[in-house]
């Protein structure tokens, strides 16, 4: 059976798009710094999560920036179930990101997901405390 083109790709609604959404995550969201990757995230009140990437010119030339974005999208696409639902996430690779092996990049993504989940649990506990 022939697989439909793009069947495994990120859906349009899974992508964080528009400067208003990115600005909201950067201004209201929380930051997690990991070796080679910085993650900004914010609760989005939707029944699904959305992801975006932000790679500045200091990262390198266009080839390096686009490679980093492709790797991040693939990491998220194949591992999105480890991230909590209902958040907007912006991944920002740092200088050493492309120097890591695929396994090392997967490990960083796993750490990011665990830290986001932990912070989200703490946030919900604080919000649900009486008084």
Image: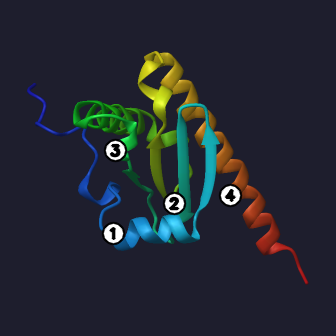
* Furthest residue in direction front, as rendered: 58
SS at circle 3: helix
Chain-order first, disc 4 or disc 1: 1
**Residue 89 in picture, x, y percent from top left:** 48, 54
**Image quadrant assignment for residue 40:** bottom right
Residue holding disc 4: 120
Q: CA distance from mark 2 to mark 1?
A: 17 Å
Mark 1: few, some, or many residues within 10 Å (few <14, many ≥20)? few
Left or right placement of residue 126 versus residue 23 in this view: right
For this view, does 61 lie left or right of residue 72? left
Q: Nearer the viewer, mark 2 or mark 1?
A: 1
Q: In front of the other: label 4 or label 1?
A: 1
Separation (CA) of disc 3 from disc 1 = 18 Å
C-alpha span from label 3 to label 2: 26 Å
- Name the disc covering residue 19, or none: 1
Q: Residue furthest right?
A: 131
> Pointer 3: what residue?
57
Q: Quadrant of the C terminus?
A: bottom right
Q: Are marks 2 and 1 in contact (CB under 8 Å)?
A: no
| Callout in the foreground (3, 4) | 3
> Residue at the location (45% across, 57% down)?
49
Identify the image quadrant of the N terminus: top left
Q: CA distance from mark 4 to mark 1?
A: 24 Å
In the image, 5: left or right of 116? left
Dot 1: element: helix
Residue ID for mark 2:
87
Instruction: Give 43 or 82, whichever is nearer the viewer.
Output: 43
Which circle's residue, 3 or 2, is located before the other in the chain?
3
């Amino acid at each position: 059976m022939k697989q439909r083109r793009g069947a495994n790709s990120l859906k349009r609604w899974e992508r964080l798009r528009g400067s208003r959404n990115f600005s909201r995550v950067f201004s209201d969201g929380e930051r997690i710094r990991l070796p080679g990757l910085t993650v900004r995230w914010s609760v989005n009140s939707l029944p699904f999560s959305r992801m975006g990437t932000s790679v500045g010119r200091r990262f390198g030339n266009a080839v390096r920036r686009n490679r980093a974005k492709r790797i991040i999208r693939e990491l998220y696409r194949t591992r999105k179930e480890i991230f909590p639902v209902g958040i907007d996430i912006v991944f920002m690779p740092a200088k050493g990101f492309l120097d890591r092996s695929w396994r090392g990049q997967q490990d960083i993504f796993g750490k990011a997901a665990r830290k986001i989940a932990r912070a989200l649990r703490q946030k919900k506990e604080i919000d649900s405390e009486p008084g």
